[in-house]
Each structure stands twice: as C-alpha cells, then as structure tokens.
Image (spheres, grey):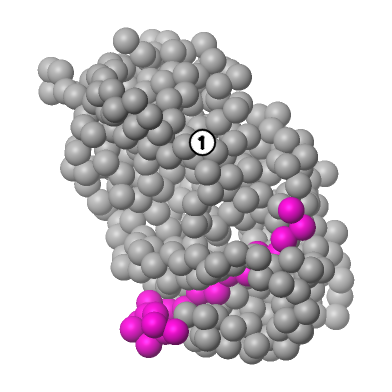
Amino acid sequence: MHDVIVIGARCGGAPTAMLLARKGYDVLLVDRAKVPSDIPHGHFVHRNGPARLRKWGLLDRVIDSGAPAIESSINDCGDYALCADELRVNGLAFGYAPRRYALDAILVEAAVEAGAQLRDEYTVESLTEHDDQISGICGRDRKTGTLTTERAKITVGADGRSSLVARRVHAPLYQSAPSQTFSYFSYWSGVTSTALEIYVRPEFALAAFPTNNNLFAVFVSWPSRLLPRIGGHIEAHFMQAVDCIPALSARLHNGRREERLYGALDLPNFLRKPFGPGWALVGDAGCHKDPFLALGMSDAFRDAEFLAEAIDAVLSGRATYEQAMSQFERLRNECTLPDYHRNIRLAKLEPLPPEIMKLRAAVRNDPALRREYTLANHDAVPRESFFNAETMKRLGIA
C-alpha cells in the first residue's frame, strides 16, 4: 500500500508528490499523458510562484530551460501604456513564463528525484473504496493495456477542472460562476520583448510575454457572450485584436507565427470541497478560475504546499484527518477567495472605476511610483503596501 497516490502530474500534482516524497512518504504519481507534454493552458508564474520555485530548488532549472526572467511590464487600459521596469522582489524577477512541457518536466523530475514513483500514460478508470472511504485507484497502463489496482491511505485528485476524483466522490461546489471569457493563443519568433504586456479594451484583453526558445506568447481573451460571433472566424478576430494595438501589431507582423492557435473555451469559476474520507483535491480540481489574472499555476504551487503539510500532519500522527484537512481547506479559502472574486469582476472587462483611472494618471510620470503601483497591482507585494489611505492622500486621490 502506498501512503499517497496523486492523480495528475502537472503544476498541482507534481509538487504535491515531490513535497511528500521529500518527507519520506511512499508516493505514486500517475498521469494519463506522456510526461512531459504540452497542454493548451496559460503559463505565467508570478506572485509567490517564483519564490516557491526558488525555495524548492527548482528556479535555476526553470531559468536553464530558456524561460527568461520578466522584470518589466506594459499595462494599457485604453488610456495609455503604463510602463514599469526593475520589477524584482527579494532578488527575484516579477515573473517567469516557462512553456508547460518545460515546467512540468522539471516538476516531475524533482518528484521522481525525491523518491516518488511515476507512472505516465496511465489512465485512472475508477476509484476503489473500503469501509466507506476512498482506498485507491483502478487504472490501465496504455503502453501495455494492463489493468491494475493500487491502494493508498490518501488519494489526491490533481486532475484538472473536470476531475474524475471530484466527480466520483461528488465533491460539493460552494462557490461557482459561469465562464467569463474564452481565449486563444499562439507563439511568434522574431519578436523583441522582455516585458509582460497587457492591453485591455471593451471587447477583449490581450496578454503577451517572452517564453522558451526565444518565442513570444500572445493570448487574446473575449467575453463569453461573443463566442457565437467570433468562434467561426478565430484567425481573423485574433489578428483584428492584435491590430488594435499598433505598437504590438507592427512587431508581430515583422515576426513569424510558429504554432497554430490554441483555444481555451470552457473556463468556469468554482471552489470545490477539497477533501473527504480518503481523498483530497488540489490545483484546478479543487479551485478553477478564469485565467484573466493568471492565478492558476502560482495558486497550485501554494495549495500543493498546504496540502502536503496537511497530509504530513495526518500520516505522522500530529493531527487527525479532519483537523489537518479542515486546516488545509481554511488556508486555501483564505488565500483564494479575495482573488477569486476580484478575478471574476475584472474578467467581465467592465470599465475601470474612475479612482483607478485617476491613480494611473497620478503615477504615470514617476518611474518609482509606476514600479510600486505595478508590483502591488499584480500582488507581487502586499496590495495594502500601496493601495492605502496614506498613499492615496499623497497622490491626491480622494
């Protein structure tokens, strides 16, 4: 019997397996895909994500993979381009944007180095149950066709927003909202940029950044209500959005698109109950958010730490299952819910409040203020360090 089985070897599951294996537990990590492989998801790591990668000893590997440090930004909400440079916190760049095939390989390699057993190209077909609790998995090795049953004290679903684990245990939803946006994205060569670039317009938002192999990633999101109009003409509408940003358009037209357009269409917002008898959820399986603020990967790292600590407390006997897992749920929700609601609000692409527009104007001509504003606005530092009454008074914002 394993101590823990983790289903899903990406940015929620692989760190969970790694952290538990580093504590000496017997961990089986399974994934239905071949590892590593790319997936059509966003891949911007920011906030506390870079710090966690450094703490885990993996940030240098991310850098060595060819993902450049992102230390500047351009934020244009239709008023002007608000530029900020030297975006570093505690010696770390503001963000990194490794392709998923590169990052997932690093995370899985670290889990295996720590002692976790990896079984990729393995499809979990069902969960097993004993004494009214989940006791493991039944799955098929796609390479050999062999059906096997594996038992564990705790089974973790890190298997995405359509989680089999969540469906099998009927994990309750207690926060939910429909998709706010849908997105398409691709990659260009020959485009010079070292910044995270964000452009928000009434009917779309565009985010772009440098990534592995000297490529430049460009993501365009539209309100979900526009899918019937745009869905059949994605290429035209994608480039139409790009051409609304003349400075960006010129750079892309001078470069070359290297890959097809990838789409992300089903982007519901929800929190699920993240644990029950013998099972737990982490990453998108437990909480999925519209990608507008690019919260998914960094939040998955955070919640993997919370869950690994909770499972360690259970397996070491320091706490009961209910005590430790309730603490995991409480910590996740305390960290997630403010961002969850803010993200939904911003993803609606409604006009920014007048006070925010005034604030942008107030910092526009001061590089230091632009830097402070940008770091706080992207939660690289505590928001209250800049968005407080004293700062607003100093800047003349009522």
x and y, in percent, of residue 78 in the image: 65, 87
Quadrant of the rendered image containing residue 392: bottom right
Q: Is residue 134 visible?
A: no
Q: Is residue 172 visible?
A: yes
What residue is shown at x 50% (from left), y 74% (from top)? Answer: 221
What residue is shown at x 46% (from left), y 51% (from top)? Answer: 336
Magenta-span inclusion, residue 230: yes
Instruction: Provide the secondary structure element on which disc 1 rests.
Output: loop
Does 223 sit above or below residue 340?
below
Q: Is residue 211 left or right of residue 326?
A: right
x and y, in percent, of residue 258 in the image: 65, 65
Quadrant of the rendered image containing residue 398: bottom right
Viewport quadrant of the N terminus: top left
Does 284 sit above or below residue 269?
above
Q: Is residue 222 left or right of residue 355?
A: left
Residues in magenta?
Answer: 213-233
What residue is shown at x 68% (from left), y 80% (from top)? Answer: 76
x and y, in percent, of residue 69 in the image: 78, 52
Quadrant of the rendered image containing residue 71: bottom right
Tell me the amino acid under the disc marked 1: Val
From the viewer's side, name the closer residue of 281 and 376. Answer: 281
Magenta-span inclusion, residue 196: no
From the viewer's side, name the closer residue of 50 and 336. Answer: 50
Q: What residue occupies the far front of the structure in this picture?
A: 144
Crowding at label 1, few (<14), some or many (≥20) Cα neighbours within 10 Å? some
Residue that badge 1 annotates: 35
x and y, in percent, of residue 59 in the image: 72, 37
Does 118 sit above or below residue 225?
above
